[in-house]
Image (spheres, helix red, strand yellow):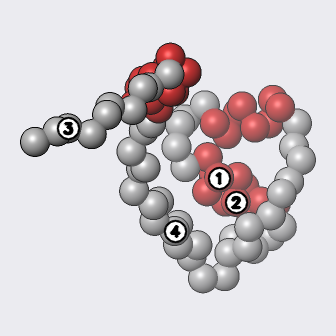
Amino acid sequence: MAQPPRRRISATETAEAAFKAAATKKADPAPQAKVIPAGKELVSLRIDRDVLEHFQEDGTGWQDRINAALRVAAGLD
């Protein structure tokens, strides 16, 4: 039984296949949507760098600390 002729693969095709195999990354799972607590609004706010650094010094939760300071300054707490 005769075999069909083999298709010649060019150097470009070989290089592209090797690159694709090396560079292709499996997709990360879709990130879950962050739930914003009721009554809060996402805003963009410009503040001085030193003020931001002051609130970020203690690590995570800095947004909540800024919110608490603003509530006190506004007389809401």
- Label number found at residue 27: none
Q: Secondary structure at mark 3?
A: loop
Tell me the mark number nearer the camera, choosing from 1 and 3.
Answer: 3
- Whether residue 72 is visible to the viewer of this picture, yes or no, is no
Circle 3 residue = 3
Q: Amino acid at mark 4?
A: Ala
Label 1–label 2 contact, CB within 8 A: yes
| For discs 4 and 2, the disc positioned in front in the rendered view | 4
Q: Quadrant of the C terminus?
A: bottom right
SS for dot 4: loop
Q: Nearer the viewer, residue 68 or 39?
A: 39
Residue 6 percent across, percent down from the top left: 32, 31
Other-residue count near label 2 (Cα within 10 Å), few / some / many at <14 / 14–19 / ≥20: few
Looking at the rendered structure, the kind of residue marked 2 is Asn
Q: Tell me the CA gap for discs 3 and 4.
A: 55 Å
Q: Could you give the CA–CA distance between mark 3 and mark 2, rounded to whole angstroms?
A: 75 Å
Real-space CA distance between mark 4 and mark 2, rounded to the nearest whole angstrom: 22 Å
How crowded is the residue under tag 4: few (<14 C-alpha within 10 Å), some, or many (20+)?
A: few
Closer to the observer: label 3 or label 2? Answer: 3
- Residue depicted at x 70% and y 60%: 67
- What kind of element bears circle 1? helix
Disc 1: which residue: 63
Q: Earlier in the sequence, mark 3 or mark 2?
A: 3
- Which residue does the numbered mark 2 point to in the structure image? 67
Mark closest to the chain's N terminus, 4 or 2:
4
